[in-house]
Image (cartoon, rainbow, N blue to C red):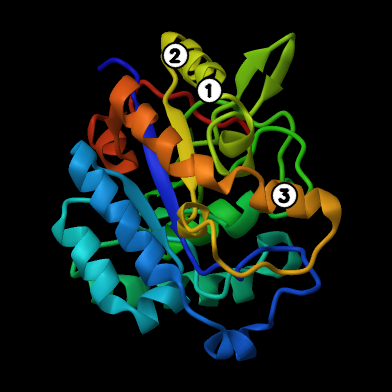
Amino acid sequence: MAARCVFSVDVEEWFHILDVPSTPPIGMWDRQESRVEASFRRMLDLFAEKRVRTTLFFLGWVAERLPQLVRDAAAQGHEIASHGYAHELVYKHDRRHFTEDVRKAKAIIEDAAGVPVRGYRAPGFSVTRETPWFFEALAATGHAYDSSIWPGDRNHGGWPGALPVPHVVPTAQGDLVEFPISMGRLLGRDLYFFGGGYLRFFPYPLIRDRARAVLAEDRPVVFYLHPREVDPDHPRLPMSAKRRFMSYVNLRTTEPKMRRVFDDLPMTTFGDLLAAGVAHLPRQVA
C-alpha cells in the first residue's frame, strides 16, 4: 500500500501547555474556563465535511469529564487513542507512576468510547533514551502502538538518532509498533513541518511539498494539532517570548491549512496502518 498521511489530534484543553510555570496544576484544572468541547467539535465538523478519518489521542482527564465527546468521535468513525491522564512529561516520572497514569487513562477512554484503545502518545513527545522502560510498560498495559518518538532535538523530549521510520520495538511483554514523528529534509537538515506551531509557521506550499517528499520515500506523514489551535480567541497563559510565539503564532491559519491538507494529501489512521501488517517494518535493535 502506498504511503499515506495520518492526521492526529491531541485532545486537551487550552491550558495544557507543558513546561510553562503559569500552567495550572491538575488540582486547579476544574476551575479554568473549558473550551475543548467547542473547539474540538469544530474540528469534527471539518473532518466530516472533508470525509477524512483521523486518530484522536484523548487526554483521560478530558474524556472523564466529556465522555459524550469521545462517543461522538468514535461514532463518526475516528480512531480513539490515549494521551495519558494527567498530561505529564514521561521522563519526569518513574515506570510505576507512568503505568498508573496510562492504565487509568485507557480505562476511562475505553469506557467512554465503547471500543478498545490500542494507541498512545506521550505528552510533549517526552519519551527519551532516559525512559528505557517506556515501551515495555505500554505493551504491558495493552497498547499495540505508540506515536511518541521525536527523532531529533526538542526542548522537552526528543530522541536524536532514533529510527525515523515506523518500526517494531520488541519488549518482554510483546512487540509494540512505533510511529515516530516524520521529519522532512530541507537545506540538508531534518525539520518538522507538519504539526503544532510548525504547521502554523511554515507556508502551506512548503508543508505540502515536504509531505509529498516524505510520502515518496514510502514513509507516512504524521500531522498533529490540538483543539486550541482552531480557537484563535482562547485565553493565553503568560510565558516567555519564544514559547508564546510557538504556542500562539498564526492561529487563524490553522483551519485554512487543514482544509488544504485534506484536499491535497491522502489520509489514513494509525489503526489502519497497523491493520495493513507490520511484517515489513524494521525491528529496533537494542
- Taking depth in this image into account, of 256 and 169 the one nearest to the observer is 256
Locate residue 36 relative to residue 96 in the image: left or right.
left
**Residue at which label 3 appears:** 157
User: Which is closer to the viewer, label 1 or label 3?
Assistant: 1
Image point 43% across, 75% down: which residue? Answer: 62
Where 105 sits versus 182, above or below? below
Locate residue 219 relative to residue 148 in the image: left or right.
left
Task: Please tell me which of labels 1 and 2 falls first in the chain.
Answer: 1
**Residue at which label 1 appears:** 207
Which element type, helix, strand or loop, lies under badge 3? loop
Packing grade of label 3 (10 A; few <14, some 14-19, many >=20) is many
Packing grade of label 2 (10 A; few <14, some 14-19, many >=20) is many
Q: Position of residue 44 (x, y in %)?
A: 27, 54
User: Which is closer to the viewer, label 1 or label 2?
Assistant: 1
**Residue at which label 2 appears:** 212
Q: How far apart in space, not on screen, are marks 1 and 3 (Cα)?
A: 23 Å
Task: Please tell me which of labels 1 and 3 falls first in the chain.
Answer: 3
Task: Please tell me which of labels 3 and 2 falls first in the chain.
Answer: 3
Residue type beneath disc 1: Ile
Mark 3–mark 2 CB contact (< 8 Å): no
Where 36 sits versus 262, above or below? below
